[in-house]
Image (cartoon, helix red, strand yellow):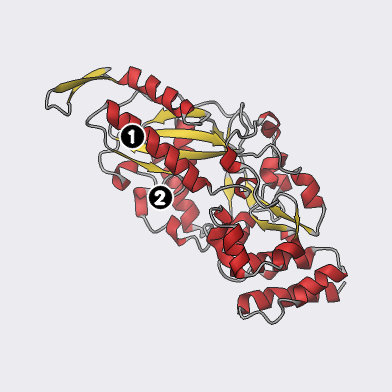
Amino acid sequence: MQNRKPQQGQNGNPQQVNYAALAAQIRGWAHELGFQAVGISDTDLSAAESGLLEWLALGWHGEQDYMANHGTKRSRPAELVPGTLRVISLRMNYLPPQARDSWQVLAEGERAFISRYALGRDYHKVLRNRLAKLADKIRAEVADFDGRVFTDSAPVMEVELARKAGLGWRGKHTLLLSREHGSWFFLGEIYLNLPLPVDIPQEEHCGSCTRCIEICPTQAIIAPYRLDARRCISYLTIELKSSIPVELRPLIGNRIYGCDDCQLACPWNGFAQTTVEPDFAVRHGLDDVSLAELFAWDEAEFKTKLSGSAIYRIGHEQWLRNIAVALGNATKSIVVIAALKSRAEHPSELVREHVAWALLQHANR
């Protein structure tokens, strides 16, 4: 690849671009914007495309129709954004340092466990803003730059792209892993039309470890690198909009939004670093709060307190559905039963059905 290529500048004269130097500038800008790691890859995802198509054919995506709606645009970046030659992948840590220990919360059945990525501000907004600023810097440097930013917002194979860009390797739980940062981070991408030099993928370092597979409460990780999302608690509590399968409800425990068990069990997260982003700090005490307290929130309180949070997206009805299941799994108490009975006549059939199930669980004990 030539490091220098003439392009038309804003004044109409040829612009000489040193792509190796530009890549170094991009890394510097990204770190200034709060990203912990940056990598660059080409757009060839053919090796991962067959696995994606098989996963979809098996129906393991469940009700996530958006996973299949875009054809091969997910595995062929240039079909999604014509002219794409490279993808910049970026990592940003999210684990809030002040959050209560996850295992302790999970052990107390009357407390609510919320996936640690959702305790603060919606990461979509934070990352998209930083990615846009980075894209603006590239645009100011190279007149012919054309690109688009993504953060879990379009058909993008972000883990595979980040792997190719050398940010880590795909763990057996299907998440990206880093020797320096574990997996407690968000990913974002910039698709662009500049032939930047690409980075070298890392070697895998999971070895014979299967802790993530063994710890999964619903055994959704059916084999290394193979996830049946229909059994995953993150899918059940966030993506699934209908009734949660009865046989899986007892396995959810007190997890009301997402599940971190596979990450908590991963030895590489012993090296993970907490976030320095104020936006990812815990809001409204969501790292350590009772199920009954959250169940008492009406829709107005839900919208007010969770405005700007990723949790806001599931809506109040699904929020109550999830908490009802968790209350059904909690130790029987006057507080738990009173909370459930307070929603027994809720206008939503979905909520009533899960409350009735929860009350029946306690009646049968």
- Residue 354 versus residue 316: which sits nearer the camera? 316
Q: Quadrant of residue 290?
A: bottom right
Q: Amino acid at mark 2?
A: Pro
| Residue at 72% across, 79% down | 344
Contact flag, marks 2 and 1 (Cβ < 8 Å): no
Q: Amino acid at mark 1?
A: Asp
If you read the primary sequence from the N terminus, does the residue marked by circle 2 or circle 1 appear first? 1
The reply to whether residue 13 is in sight is yes
Q: Closer to us: mark 2 or mark 1?
A: 1
Residue 270 point in image, percent of width and height: 71, 31
| Residue at 49% across, 60% down | 64
Q: Quadrant of residue 103?
A: top right
Helix, strand or loop status at disc 1 = helix
| Residue at 53% across, 53% down | 308
Q: Is residue 348 left or right of residue 153?
A: right
Residue 305 point in image, percent of width and height: 61, 58
- Residue 53 versus residue 160: which sits nearer the camera? 160
- Residue 91 versus residue 204: which sits nearer the camera? 91
Mark 1 Cα within 10 Å, few/some/many (few <14, many 20+)?
some
Q: What residue would you read off at disc 1?
A: 136
Q: Is residue 60 above or below residue 74?
A: below
Q: What residue would you read off at disc 2?
A: 155
